Amino acid sequence: MASNLMRWQRQVPFCFQLRGDALLFVLAVFFIFSHITHEFSRGSVLAADFEGFDAEDLDYDEATEESIHSHPLKSSPPPSTSLSQSSTQESHHGPPSPPAVDDHRSPTKELSGISHPSLELWDEDEFEGIPFPTAESSPDSVVQPADPDEPSVVPGAGDGSPPQIAKWRLGSFVTEIVCVSFLIVFTINYFIGKRQNELIALCWASQFATKGSVFDRNFSLLGTGDGKEDAPLLLKEGQEVFKFYASGRRYCKHLLATMELRSRHDLIARIAGLLFRNKDTITFEVAMNDDAMDNVVLALARKKMAKSMHKEAWDLQKFATVMANPPSGRRWVAEDLMVVTESREVAGDLINDAVIDQVFGDKAFEKFGKGFISLHFSDQRPGSQKKVLLLKFVLPDANNMADMTRLVNLVPFYIDLIGRYKLSSQARPKTETARAKSAQEAFKEQQSKRQEVLQKKKAEKKKQMEEAEVKLSSEVIRKREEKERARQMKKLMPKVKMMKSH
């Protein structure tokens, strides 16, 4: 049943169907995944063991550097002029290899391994045979010999303290955990809310648009197809908007039902809907034939909404007034409802005893009118289609769709009633006068708009001519002024008529 009712899904790959919220969700997941990967890689670099670096590559603290700069370098006595004999044979390929350094060397010899700006310029090849100058040791800058059994520790960044090894803590990933949790909840809510909206639309269609239902009995064509059995009944325009089309009935051109459901697929909108108590609604718009609807302007709604409609709707504001007192000698609508009409006769004829007993009476409205929002009938509605019937109801839950049966039955009932309705000879002149006056005002408004457009064009043309005159030469301007002066003088000269003599 569901597959026959809704076939709006297209057979294309999933990656090409990502639109709207689904596309945003995929991009958000990709962003969070890349951010977490970046955090892991940065933590791995901080926790890495810096092995293979010598003590000469490390930075010392400021106290050691100041102690080195505070003492002058000791230079060795000048070398003797006699040649010194080396125990090893010197090679011509370069300076001899330095002798092995004793492990138990003095603090002064240990200090010679410290890099110093003045010692970096010393070239062993240039000063071959001359002892390497050493800096005088200081008690504060004595470097203790390293213990071979003690593991090497990488100092801190310039303060001599041991490195702070990065530890994995749960508090370091609070932002990532919150974002991932929100995305998971958003994804679950998206699919659940989407399915709930589809279920409501399908339940409504199965209750009122299937074979043997109220619309099947009153319309010959249901759905967007050409009468085919497998044509879809509903047209999905979004995750919360569904439309139903029907045609093939007397007095009207077509019927369009628009279901506007809550945004259950959107987590934020769903929370906001719970706070503001948004409801699922359905609006029936019936386009009447031009010769099937008389001069009728009528609206019925709850008091607060009726006043709002009277202020906002152009046709109600132009032609209708609030009906304060009910017709004498007959039953009327419930106290919660208000009627806005052009003529009391029209209101009394269209809100008859049948609809009062079914829906709009006091007892019936308390039981069956909970889902009623408004109805609005007008032959002067702005737009291409002027003669329109609008009925708006609240959609119940999927399990209680039969509760709005009486409200839905009002649609075909009013199509037939207004299609056959004719004004009396007493009420017609008043409505005709109001429409003639409205047409005359509309014509004057169009004329004023047309005059404004013409004046605007003249002003633009004059401005263009002035700009063109500025660009012309003085000789051309002089000739044009003379020509204009001659034309003005010719107009001022008296006209002389020539008479023929007989």
Image: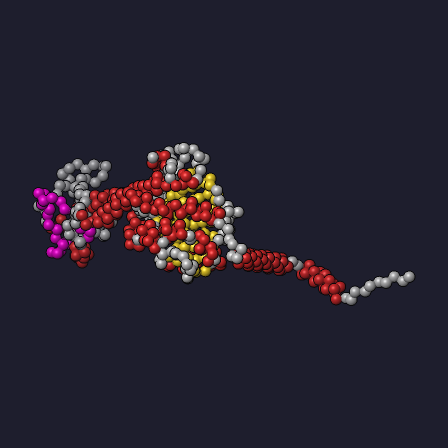
Q: Nearer the viewer, residue 6 or 15?
A: 6
List x then y, in percent, for residue 337. Answer: 37, 57
Q: Nearer the viewer, residue 39 or 495?
A: 495
Say whether residue 280 is left or right of residue 463: left
List x then y, in percent, for residue 456. Answer: 58, 58
Quarter of the rendering occupied by the N terminus: top left
List x then y, in percent, for residue 99. Answer: 14, 41
Q: Is 492 above or below relative to 216?
A: below
For image coordinates 13% across by 41% down, the residue present is 100
Q: Nearer the viewer, residue 274 or 467?
A: 274
List x then y, in percent, for residue 379. Answer: 49, 52
Q: Is residue 325 magenta?
A: no
For image coordinates 40% across by 52% down, the residue present is 353
Residue sitting farthest toward the front: 329
Q: Is 250 above or below relative to 444?
A: above
On the question of residue 498 being in view, the answer is: yes
For image coordinates 44% across by 55% down, the residue present is 348
Question: What range of the chain is rendered magenta?
Answer: 133-158
Residue sitting farthest toward the right: 502
On the question of residue 438 being in view, the answer is: no
Q: Is residue 150 magenta?
A: yes
Say whether residue 214 is left or right of residue 63: right
Quarter of the rendering occupied by the C terminus: bottom right
